[in-house]
Every structure is written in C-alpha cells, then in structure tokens.
Image (cartoon, grey):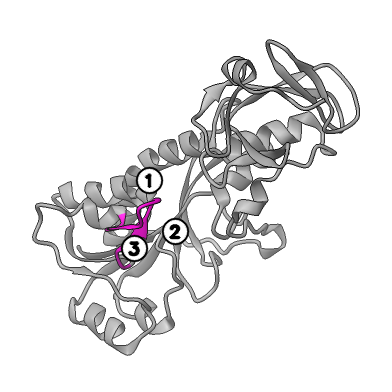
C-alpha cells in the first residue's frame, strides 16, 4: 500500500519507522510542520518526524497551512492509497481526506471518545485514569470525532509522568497501525461510530496550566505534577519566583493550603487535603536538584 505519513511530534516517529521497514507498504511522502526556532538560542530545528527521515530519499512537504490549495495538490500528486496522521498539529480539510481510496487514518493517544484534543496523555494522568491507549480512527472533518477502526490499551502506572506515558504509547502505536492497514488491505476493517455523549476534551496546555492550586487535595496535585512533567511543568510561587516541581509524594499531614509544614531535610506543603513532600525541584534561573540540596542553598522566608 502506498502511504503518505502526516505528523510532527516525537510520538509518531516509531509508527513512521515501522511503515518504512514494512515490506507491505511504501512511504511515498511525508508531510510535517515547518522547521522552527527551539530553545533559548532559538536555533532553527526540524521537527522530529523530519529528523527521522535523514538518510532516506522520501519526499518531505512542510507547508505553513495544509489547507492551502498548493499543499492539497502536492499531496494529491503523490497518489496515496492511504494517509496516516499522528500528532500533526493541524486539522486536515475534506479535500485531503477524500484523496486516498482506502482511508485517511489518525492515530490518537487516548481511548476515544475519552480525551479528544491536543493533550490526551496529560489529561489521562491528571484525571487518575487507570488505562489509556492508541485509537486508530477514520478521519473526518471534526476534532478526533471519526469512526474507530481499532484500539490498543495499556495500564497507566502510579509512577507514570507525561513523558514516560508518551514514550510507552509511542511504542504500541506501530503495531496498532500495521494491524489497521492489514485489515484495510483485506477489506475487513471494522468501523464503529464514537458515542459523542461520552466525549471529553483535553485542550492544548499552556504554561499557566502548570500553576499549582494548593486548595486542591494532595492526590490531585500529585497527579498533575506527574502529568505535566515535562510540559508545561508544575510550579508554585516561592518568594516571588517560580519553583518548578518534578515529583512529590503524599504525606498524611494537614495545615492551611499552601503552608510550609516542614523545611529542614524535606519540603512539605499543605494541600486542601493532606500534604505533599516535594521531590526534585528547580528554582527559576537555577538547576534541577532534590529538595535536600535545594534547602541547603536556599533560605526560605518565614
């Protein structure tokens, strides 16, 4: 099967690599976002999907807007049998969805219809979900609203962060994709409409979403700290500066929400219910360290 792969983020790299290794399918083109400035130095870097193609002769398209007529015609000219999308960052217009004779498939990092949208991995951890997975769906013009072809599930571990769950989902995506393409090739792929009444959205996160609300119970804050590691990063205000928090554990103590209960060998802060003992932290402008190191070099105001 001739496949055009459309994606940008790191999570799609294993799926793309599996397609390129497959003897049954040919990646005839890749569409990804334009190169962008990254980091403090704002150095222009290609997206992860483009980096994965180094050393290959696969055609790469990087339109600013995939809805533009030129972009649509360039994809049409490739004459794909199927289009596969994962973590691209733009909604495909109907004109592209209608190009492949088999299907336009999207790999989404949740068990749809739960957690449609841009941040399903973080949302699943923050909500305390016990499982998540990869959904392969037929694309339509909505936001993650298409019929489901198949789903593959994994458990969410009590230690999972946004990063670790992202990486584990990336590893199960290739098998799910290849199974879906095989079913399409044999003309026996299932098609199950989503129950829109069960849909929940996970909107794109901003830095502000990482700000800790100490009125919330400690168990909810702890989940958010893991969910938002590494992005957007959970943080609190400390003497007018951001203190980024990478990990924490729940402590059976109580106090006024936001009150520092212990600050000698550990940093314990009261939440709406129970408290949190902070693990690794990073003060604005400083390096990451554990709380014992942090407390040795930082005098907390009384």
Q: Return the disc, 1 or 2, that comes first in the chain's sequence.
A: 1
The total number of labels drawn is: 3
Residue at image point 35% right, 69% down: 103
Residue 259 sits in which quadrant? top right
- Magenta highlight on residue 269: no
Q: Examine the rendering and report whether any part of residue 191 can be seen.
A: yes
Q: Which residue bears the numbered disc 3?
A: 36
Choose mark 1 or mark 3, whichever is in front.
Answer: 3
From the viewer's side, name the closer residue of 27 and 241. 241
SS class, disc 1 = helix
Residue farthest top in this picture: 265
Q: Nearer the viewer, mark 1 or mark 2?
A: 1
Single out the mark in the foreground, 3 or 2: 3
Whole-number angstrom distance, CA of label 1 to CA of label 2: 18 Å
Residues in magenta? 34-47
Question: In the rendering, at what x and y percent does residue 227 appear?
Answer: 59, 39
Which quarter shows the C terminus? Answer: top right
Task: Give the vertical position of 212 relative to 199 (above or below).
Answer: above
Residue hosting label 2 = 190
Q: Is residue 142 above or below residue 261?
A: below
Residue 194 lies, with reference to residue 248, above or below; the image says: below
Point 59% across, 55% down: residue? 205
């Amino acid at each position: 099967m001739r496949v055009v792969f459309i994606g940008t983020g790191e999570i799609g790299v294993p799926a793309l690599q599996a397609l390129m290794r497959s003897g049954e399918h040919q990646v005839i083109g890749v569409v990804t976002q334009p190169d962008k400035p990254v980091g403090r130095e704002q150095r222009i870097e290609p997206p992860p999907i483009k980096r994965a193609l180094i050393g290959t002769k696969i055609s790469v398209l990087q339109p600013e807007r995939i809805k533009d007529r030129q972009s649509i015609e360039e994809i049409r000219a490739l004459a794909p049998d199927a289009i596969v999308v994962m973590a691209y960052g733009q909604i495909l217009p109907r004109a592209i969805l209608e190009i492949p004779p088999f299907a336009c498939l999207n790999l989404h990092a949740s068990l749809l219809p739960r957690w449609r949208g841009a941040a399903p991995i973080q949302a699943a951890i923050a909500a305390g979900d016990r499982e998540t997975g990869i959904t392969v769906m037929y694309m339509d013009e909505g936001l993650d609203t298409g019929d489901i072809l198949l789903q593959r599930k994994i458990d969410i571990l009590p230690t999972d962060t946004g990063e670790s769950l992202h990486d584990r989902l990336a590893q199960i995506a290739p098998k799910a994709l290849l199974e879906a393409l095989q079913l399409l090739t044999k003309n026996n792929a299932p098609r199950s409409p989503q129950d829109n009444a069960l849909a929940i959205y996970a909107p794109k996160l901003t830095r502000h979403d990482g700000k800790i609300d100490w009125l919330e119970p400690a168990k909810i804050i702890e989940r958010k700290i893991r969910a938002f590691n590494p992005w957007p990063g959970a943080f609190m205000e400390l003497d007018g500066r951001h203190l980024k928090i990478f990990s924490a554990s729940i402590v059976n103590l109580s106090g006024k929400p936001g009150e520092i209960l212990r600050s000698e060998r550990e940093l314990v802060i009261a939440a709406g219910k129970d408290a949190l003992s902070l693990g690794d932290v990073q003060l604005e402008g400083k390096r990451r360290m554990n709380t014992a190191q942090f407390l040795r070099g930082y005098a907390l105001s009384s």
